[in-house]
Amino acid sequence: MGTSAAYSAPSSWGDLKTEVTRAASGSPPSPTASRGLLRSFIEHSGGAHTLARGRGGSGPARGKAVRATAGRLGGFIADVARAGLTQALQNAGWDDLIGRPVPEILAALLDRLGGEASTIDDVDARMALARLQEEYFGDAATTEELEQLLSAQALRLETILSDFFGHYLYEVFCRVFFERLVQRVGEARANKFLKEIGNFIDATLADRTAGRDLTQIAWSGGEGRAITTEILETTLEVFSS
């Protein structure tokens, strides 16, 4: 379970907190139960439409940080596919990363694509990006392999950003409920339950197709913001429908 500092959900979330605690107390949640908990969580956080536009409700999720990170990630991957890793780093003004070992490059990309970590929503977005990097690029041993792995995602940007948003949903869910669950059902059961929620999110998004070619859009402008908003809302709607 990868979340950092806990977050105390508002008192108005009492019904959802009770549902989550009850679910964690018994057998592993069924897919139907997992979907119901995530749907309720998204609704309590303001709903898919509101979150996707960076206007989260009373919970920790706001949507603004994760959209900004997604835009930077999409733009960088597309640039690597067009120009290669070295040129993409130069285009971003990150000449200091050229020729560095892969772990150093990935750590720096986490900082630079992830942006500031001044709010809990920023932190959740960065932790989601860290999980995504490990999942997609963690096997790269050389910069050539990293370039190949990055370029391979260019024609499936819609899918990788959807996965990123799924990781973000998981991080926020964990942040809200982990500490409470540890207090009520114990750490082992809390971790097992949250792992099941994470597995359900991953499995639900696993069969999504690559979708559109997004390599030529202007990720740093309005077009990029519109695309990330759309993908975030569509991803959340998978669980909130």
Image (cartoon, grey):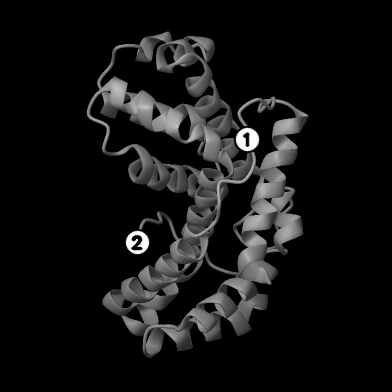
Q: Is residue 41 at least partly visible in the picture? A: yes
Task: Estimate the x, y position of residue 233 in percent, counting from the top left.
Answer: 69, 55
Mark 2 vs mark 1, CA separation in Å: 33 Å
Q: Residue at x 33, y 43 (%)?
A: 134
**Residue 159 sits above or below residue 104 on the image:** below
* Res 236 → quadrant: bottom right
Q: Is residue 44 visible?
A: no
Disc 2 marks which amino acid? Met
Image coordinates of residue 89 in percent, x first then y, are 45, 15
Which residue carries the number 2 mark? 1
From this view, report whether residue 166 is shown above or below residue 35: above
Q: Nearer the viewer, mark 2 or mark 1?
A: 1
Kindly identify which numbered label has been placed on residue 213: 1
Residue 77 drawn above or below residue 205? above
Q: Secondary structure at mark 2?
A: loop
Quadrant occupied by the C terminus: bottom right
Q: Nearer the viewer, residue 136 or 134?
A: 136
